[in-house]
Each structure stands twice: as structure tokens, then as C-alpha cells.
Amino acid sequence: MVTRKPILAGNWKMNKTPAEAVEFVRALRPKVTPYPQVETVVCPPFVALPAVADALRGVKIGVGAQNMHWAENGAYTGEVSAAMLAGLAGYVIIGHSERRQFFAETDEGVNKKLKAVLAHGLVPIVCVGEDLAQNEAGVTDSFVSGQVRAALAGLSASQATGVVIAYEPIWAIGTGKTATSEVANRVCGLVVRGAVAGLYGEQVAQTIRIQYGGSANEKNIGELMAMPDIDGALIGGASLKVDAFAEMVRITAEQR
Ligand code: 13P
């Protein structure tokens, strides 16, 4: 049996100034460093990345960006490339549903970004997930597996192995409505891991890490992490509070 290191990532979205971000990670540091068995990552806004990276130098807490552009450089006003992030961040969130919904990101763009992230040696966290209408129409499985296949198109098996996929049902994001751990586990396992197995075989599928995201917090993380196909969480609201986020790391560590 393959053991997959649990990964908890805080997606701060458009929250915290650089000064607030530094204050947060300074407070977080002593609370999570006793748990090296959990890969803990914070994803602040772009402008806070240099200060957070500085504050965490030599500390085993990962730093991630929330987005990036696929091009190396060029006439893309307002965008940031993987080359610019390398050195500041070790992870990049790609294709978050809020990017897809509010900034018209497509599966094709997600695929291009994924290739650029991997080319720079960063760890991609690729988000997939259905909305409420799709969920109620019963098309979750086909939609989510289609998103996984589109994101990974053209990647080799060894590239795919390094990808983290976050299953975030849109109806559960910021709503306080979590998918039950059984439902989350079914989609993470059967649908997401199943799609990876269809592309690369069972060994890659068993190696790849799959997070759940959507109103994950310190109360439900234990139940979610007890599920065999859930390898971590991508956390929004609860990751903005030092104690809640640290408690999630502690609970995860003590379960493994
Ligand atoms: P919440 O945890 O606030 O529901 O956000 C989830 C999310 O979108 C993380 O990327």
C-alpha cells in the first residue's frame, strides 16, 4: 500500500495585507512545526509572498501562490509568471472555481498553467469540482472526471505523479455546507483517482494526492482525513484563523 503524505493548504483568497500575513505565519509557526508528518502550506495574495517567504525561510511550512499566468513573460498586464514565483513559492493553486467563475478560466488555460508550473519545479494544486446545478442534475462524476482529464492532458506519468488535485464542490465553498465525508471520499477516490488511473494506471493513481475543499474546518477535518481517498484539504475561511488552521494540522497529524 502506498502512503501519501497529508497536505493541508490554506487558500487565503483576497485576504490579509503583507503585514497581517507575516503576523499570521509568525504565530502559526510554533503551532505547526511539531507536526512534520503533515505538509502545511499557506497561500497568501501575491503581494504578501516575498514577506511570507522571508518570514518562513528555513521553516517547514510551504508557501503557495493562488494563481499565475502560463507564459514566461510578456504583454499580459497584471499577470505573474511561474518564473517570477519560483524562489518565493513552492506551490501554485491552479483553476480554483472562483478563477473559473469570475475570471473566465477554462480547462485549456488550466492545462497550460499546469505545464508551466511543472516546468518551474513548483507543486501545482489543481482545483476541480461541480456546481450545485450539476450536482443536483447528477452529472458530478462525468463533469469532474472531465476536468481532471482536461487538466492533465499531455502530461507524462512522472509529471502527473507530482500534481495535487483538490476536489472542491462549488456548492460547499464558503457556504458552511460540507460534503459528507463519504460523498467527498467517493468523488476523490472513484472519480478523481479513477480518472487518473484511466490515464496513467493504478500506480500513479495511488501515488497522486487528492485534497477535499469546501467548508473544511477544525470540527470536520478529523472525519474527512479518516477517509482512505482524502489526502488533505484546501481550506478557505478556517485557514484565516491561526488557531483553527493549526488545530486542523494537529488533528491530521495525530490521525496519521
Ligand atoms: P472555504 O473553506 O471557505 O469553504 O473555501 C474553500 C476553498 O475555496 C479553498 O480553496
Image (cartoon, helix red, strand yellow):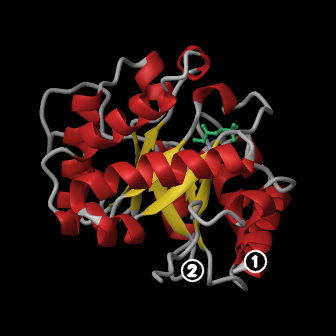
The crowding category of the residue bearing disc 2, from other C-alpha atoms within 10 Å (few below 14, some 14 to 19, many at least 20), is few
Res 123 label = none
Which residue is depicted at the point 80% across and 71% down? 251
Q: Amino acid at mark 1?
A: Gln
Mark 1 against mark 2, which lies toward the viewer?
A: 1
* Whether residue 31 is situated above or below residue 169 in the rendered picture: below
Q: Amino acid at mark 2?
A: Val
Cα separation, mark 1 vs mark 2, equals: 23 Å
Sequence-first tag of 1 and 2: 2
* Whether residue 161 is situated above or below residue 166 in the rendered picture: below
The crowding category of the residue bearing disc 1, from other C-alpha atoms within 10 Å (few below 14, some 14 to 19, many at least 20), is few
Which residue is depicted at the point 50% across and 75% down? 4
Q: Is residue 114 left or right of residue 101?
A: left
Q: Is mark 1 within 8 Å of ligand 1?
A: no
Q: Is residue 155 left or right of residue 62?
A: left
Task: Report ligand 1 position as a quadrant.
Answer: top right
The residue that label 1 is drawn on is 255
Can you give x and y, in whole percent of width and height, for residue 246 in the image? 78, 66
Q: Quadrant of the C terminus?
A: bottom right
Q: Is residue 177 left or right of residue 112?
A: right
Secondary structure beneath disc 2? loop
Can you give x and y, in whole percent of width and height, for residue 211 in the image? 55, 55
Res 59 label = 2
